[in-house]
Amino acid sequence: MLLNLQDVTKTYPGAEAPVLRGISFSMDKGEKLALTGESGSGKSTLLHLIGGLDSADGGSIRVEGIDLMPLDDAGRAALRRGRVGVIFQAFNLIPSLTVAANIAFQARLAGRHNPAEADRLAQRLGLTDHLAKYPEQLSGGQQQRVAIARAILPKPALVLADEPTGNLDEGTADTVLELLSELVTESGAGLVLVTHSERLAGRMDRRLHLRAGRLA
């Protein structure tokens, strides 16, 4: 089992109601899971908890058997370096680094940088001619491809993608998601995709729908 959640809860300080109200599910290695729901349903919050970007109030979250709940900030950061890759809607590239350096960034932190594999990923994602450029010189679709390469290069067990095509037009979104899906399959990783798009969700192996902090 790659991922297991049991009765996960989360309430933000000052909020009138919990964001997550007892979420439980599991997924196997290599599985692709779509997480859907209306804005405010808790999708991104749940993804951030799984990725160790925030901590849950209760329940348990296990990635490859490792319980995130007892981990401090450093422990969760170590988990992201070695086991979990995260792709954001806003790309979150480092503007002062070239495309090549952005791609290598996470893998270097994890001690897993492989220049030959980085070159292969760049070629697969159509980035070979852009490696010396900076993020501001790229289109949105190109920036998201860089973000995908950065997440995939360290060979994580689990890839989390938070509306990765939300800032892209439909044609570019389809191309980017197809590339992401292919690369995740090749690496043997699992994928959790947060999306508003029923069309994109339909491409995953399974779908979970959140409504008001619960699985519907």
Image (tube, rainbow, N blue to C red):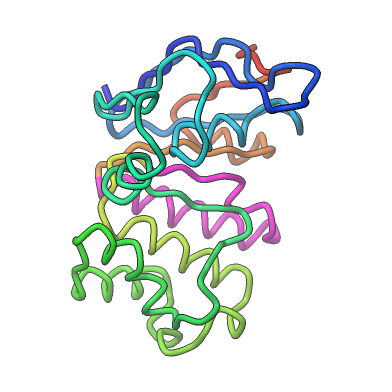
Q: Residue at x 58, y 35 (%)?
A: 201
Please determine whether, in this image, residue 85 is positioned above or below residue 158: below
Task: Specify the quadrant of the image occupied by residue 20.
Answer: top right
Left or right relative to 170: residue 5: left
**Image side of residue 146 versus residue 157, left or right:** right
Locate the C terminus and report the quarter of the image it occupies.
top right
- Magenta-drawn stretch contains 176: yes
Residue shown at the point (46%, 68%) measured from the top left: 146
- Is 187 on the left or on the right of 210, as rendered? left
Magenta: main secondary structure: helix
Please state, as top left, top right, bottom left or bottom right, where the N terminus lies in the image: top left
State yes or no: residue 92 in magenta: no
Of 65 and 206, the residue lying toward us: 65
In magenta, the rendered stretch is: 159-187
Q: From the top left corner, tell me how far across and down residue 66 is, in percent.
A: 27, 27
Q: Residue at x 41, y 69 (%)?
A: 125
State which quadrant residue 19 falls in: top right
**Could you tell me how many numbered marks the image carries?**
0
Residue found 66% across the figure and 27% down from its top:
42
In the rendered image, the vertical position of residue 97 relative to residue 86, given as above or below? below
Front-most of 208 and 5? 5
Residue 177 in the image: state x and y as whole percent: 51, 52
